[in-house]
Image: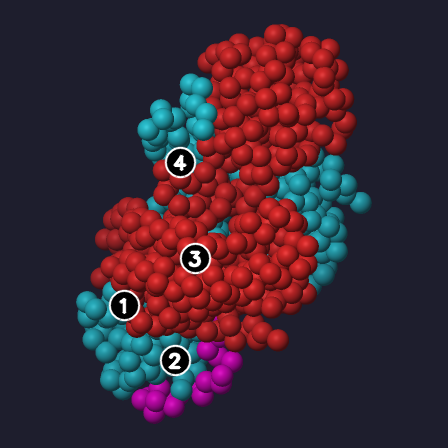
Chain colours: A red, B cyan
Amino acid sequence: MTDFREVGKRAKAATVSMARVTTAQKNELLHALADLLERESAAIIEANAIDVENGKKNNMPAGLVDRLLLDTDRIKGMADGLREVAALDDPIGSMESVTVRPNGLKIGRMRVPMGVIGIIYEARPNVTTDAFGLCFKSGNVCILRSGTDARYSAEAIVKLIRQALSEQGLPEDCCQVLLDVDRESLLEFMQLKEYVDLLIPRGGAGLIRNVVENSRIPVIETGTGNCHVYVDASADLDMAVDIIFNAKTQRIGVCNACESIVIHKDVVDELMPALKKRLDEKNVEIRGDESVRKSVDGIVAAGDDDWGTEYLDYILSAKTVSSIDEAIEHINRYNTGHSESIVTSDYNNANRFLNEVDAACVYVNASTRFTDGNEFGFGAEIGISTQKLHARGPMGLKEITTTKYVIMGNGQIR
Amino acid sequence: MTDFREVGKRAKAATVSMARVTTAQKNELLHALADLLERESAAIIEANAIDVENGKKNNMPAGLVDRLLLDTDRIKGMADGLREVAALDDPIGSMESVTVRPNGLKIGRMRVPMGVIGIIYEARPNVTTDAFGLCFKSGNVCILRSGTDARYSAEAIVKLIRQALSEQGLPEDCCQVLLDVDRESLLEFMQLKEYVDLLIPRGGAGLIRNVVENSRIPVIETGTGNCHVYVDASADLDMAVDIIFNAKTQRIGVCNACESIVIHKDVVDELMPALKKRLDEKNVEIRGDESVRKSVDGIVAAGDDDWGTEYLDYILSAKTVSSIDEAIEHINRYNTGHSESIVTSDYNNANRFLNEVDAACVYVNASTRFTDGNEFGFGAEIGISTQKLHARGPMGLKEITTTKYVIMGNGQIR
């Protein structure tokens, strides 16, 4: 049994040392760890082989086994990821502004680490180094809970992380891993508000719901995306076909993929035959309402459940509306606050869509697939937040920090 | 029985209209409401008299009855508060920056309302107009739950708010009030994640704990402050006495009052007699450790409980330390993340205190009593956040908003 309070206490204690680590020391550690991972790749691959073997024994689907598997190339990818994080600007210690009050008090808002961050994820070994790298660069101590299907890989990788920390004279407890922690005991961990400042779940809808519903530690909700593309009456229809094809099929299993399209009634008959033809290239099943089905052959009838479903598959729902108001209303009812796009040539409709659609990322004339830390120019991301509090949209280093006011006086009293 | 889902649905529906309200319309409404409150002060005072009478019947302490009581002066104060909010900059719609990506996508981060905010407070009638004013100016719809001891006052005030909204052609449901809602049914309200985007509890520790522990809606924790002043070995001791006297006694019932002092052992014998003499002017009881008690007569022995206690009274605990490290460790152990101050002449110790003390506001050579939206120059505040997520320290209009990314393209795909 893991003593979570003990883990929490050790993490909290490590934050004191983290407060004194310079940017140069952080970058040195990240490079040293990258080198160490490559040098010790044989040990990582050996541990990973146990996870892969267990996965196969337990009839893990081939896609998941592939995601779990590590080889020297993939380990080099993890190491390069750490080097990229080293190249990012360090947000800690900077001040957005310092104002001087009439009484002479100087008030600044300084960016500081959150403290201790817990990352709960599934059987993806690369998340272990990714999450550590981002937490460490932003001055945070992390507690990682890997999916149990990757426990030997996670154990081997965290051993190397702690070795690198120790070799650089930093506390090993800047990174701890929870192994063999089942769902039941995870509940207990999620109550440790006293020691853990933030929890970030990374994974499927079930994992995220479990954390959001049960955690007493503040959570940043990442994840599910029931993303729409709305084709306005004034849309360039060739552009609409390109954007929908890209947003639906470029990668189907991701949260920023398009799951549903909304079409103005005036263009449904012209759009659908061309769109159907294009989507047929990837055998996409279209589930439409009556107007959509009348516009072209081969459309499946959509049921009420379709509007709210994130398929993560070669399936797309299609709904007709008679105005932009109806489009916005439908999207605000069914979207999950992720990414929404309008294809239009109308200035007012573009502005109304940007202002009135309630989501982390709202697009005009572009694919929803751009919602991503790298595509936004943040360099690396820890996830995409679909909540409104604290962070919304792709989260870079800054989003896993907080601020404090520092006030410099010379004896001021009220 | 209040149908909370119905209240939530109506609030959510009102957010659609709020998205289209201009700053000029907001300011017009706030001024019209201020005038209406003054014009209808007789009706408010009549309703308030019922609350006051009930309070007296139920043996409400005199201090609370006074806080509950409204007269024309206090109503004018509430109206002036709304006029001050009208004068604040409207944060909605502004963009911090717009960047252009290599592919031509323009990415901006636009400030937008949270949506629906629930404010749960105690028997303070002025909070009803304060909270509505700040929520409305920041484009949010609010659901107010006044303490039951002020239910008739809250009902009368919200009736006028809704009348003003309606007269300006705005939906009345921009402001709803929950009346006769006991603790039990409040639990039910706090589950409405689907309709309410944010809950802010304003009041005593019990109220806040109840909301933080039971809400499934995201909460901003405001409140309790176990604030310290640390007197360093290098401190100007006259300044230390002035700052401690001010921070302890200027107003005792507030969260930014000093509750505990920490003294370097080298100055305890010189500091304490002068400090004791000064605090005697207000009959402050000092509870100290052994060194403090040796330094001057009349100090009560501190128990272990004293270090973690927010007295909100003329009581002060005093602890001796032998280094700044010990001071920071003690403060980080017992503080509630509110406001902490060091009195020092030493450059390095000032910087270490600012960097290493974990609190919303950290001071050098100034009273903790400055932690306040007005003192910081924000113009008005909705509370002081002691959490790290989303908002930390005094919260102005900006802290009850969120952002969304708006992305403008001309056909970009990945």
- Disc 4: which residue: A376
Helix, strand, or loop for circle 1?
helix
Res B348 quadrant in image: bottom left
Q: Is residue B306 magenta?
A: yes
Badge 1: residue crowd in 10 Å (few <14, some 14–19, many ≥20): some
Q: Chain of mark 1?
A: B
Do the residues under discs 1 and 2 have CB atoms within 8 angstroms?
A: no
Which residue is nearer to you in this view: A312 or A19? A312
- What amino acid type is highlighted by mark number 4? Phe
Do the residues under discs 3 and 1 have CB atoms within 8 angstroms?
A: no
Badge 4: residue crowd in 10 Å (few <14, some 14–19, many ≥20): many
Do the residues under discs 3 and 4 have CB atoms within 8 angstroms?
A: no
Which residue is nearer to you in this view: A173 or B298? A173
Q: Chain of mark 2?
A: B
- Residue B214, can we see it? no
- Disc 3: which residue: A129
Q: Marks 3/4: CA distance?
A: 22 Å
Give me the residue at 46% from left, 32% from top: A370
Label drawn at residue B318:
2
Label drawn at residue B352:
1
Q: In the rendering, at what x and y percent does residue A190 appear?
A: 59, 63
Left or right, residue B7 beside residue B291: right
Question: Which quadrant: the N terminus of chain B?
Answer: top right
Badge 2: residue crowd in 10 Å (few <14, some 14–19, many ≥20): many
Which residue is nearer to you in this view: B202 or B91? B91
Tag in front: 3 or 4: 3
Left or right, residue B365 beside residue B337: left
Helix, strand, or loop for circle 3?
helix
Which range is magenta? B290-312
Tag in front: 1 or 4: 4
Q: Marks 3/1: CA distance?
A: 31 Å
